[in-house]
Image (cartoon, helix red, strand yellow):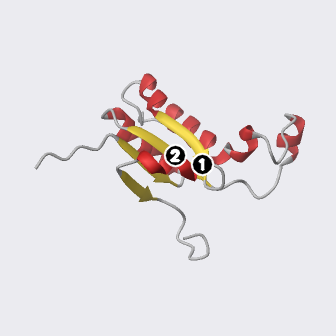
Amino acid sequence: MDRRMNRACVIGAGVMGATIAAQLANVGIETVLLDIVPPELTDDDKKKGLTPESTGFRNKFGNNGLNIALKSKPASFYIPENAKLITIGNLEDDLALLKDVDWIIEVVVERLDIK
């Protein structure tokens, strides 16, 4: 039986989740990387002109995880261009992205209220 994984999702964009997403992208698998919406705007967010409705704010944890993976040493990505295979989102706005994934892995902090 031939089984192929073309698309995956990683829920949790911390160091481990973002690195797993990077490794999936490294082998050519399109990956959705989701995390929670941050609980509140920081002063830095406000200085950037972000609002609670801003995509940049709502996807902040996912973007941060991807950026950390891009800068990590040793490198998480074989080549930085592999990061283009990762789609960032959040669990409130982007669950529809999961409809076409072949595999989902949850990589969040060990807290039952989150899981």
From where the camera sits, is residue 79 visible?
yes
Q: Are marks 2 and 1 in contact (CB under 8 Å)?
A: yes
- Residue identifier under label 2: 97
Quarter of the image with the C terminus in it: bottom right
Q: Is residue 46 left or right of residue 104?
A: right
List x then y, in percent, for residue 52. 82, 48
Q: Quadrant of residue 28?
A: top left
| Residue at image location 83% in from the left, 50% down from the top | 41
| Residue 70 vertical placement versus 108 (above, below) | above
Q: Is residue 87 left or right of residue 31?
A: right
| Residue 32 vertical placement versus 111 (above, below) | above
- Element on which disc 2 rests: helix
The crowding category of the residue bearing disc 1, from other C-alpha atoms within 10 Å (few below 14, some 14 to 19, many at least 20), is some
Q: Say which amino acid is labelled 1.
A: Asp
Q: Is residue 74 left or right of residue 28?
A: right
Q: In this view, does 105 lie to the left or right of 67?
A: left
Q: Quadrant of residue 29?
A: top left
List x then y, in percent, for residue 40. 81, 55
Name the foreground residue: 65 vs 93. 93
List x then y, in percent, for residue 47. 89, 36
List x then y, in percent, for residue 101. 40, 47
From where the camera sits, is residue 13 visible?
no
| Residue at image location 41% in from the left, 55% down from the top | 104
- How much space separates mark 2 and mark 1, taking CA atoms? 6 Å
| Residue at image location 52% in from the left, 46% down from the top | 97
- Residue identifier under label 1: 94
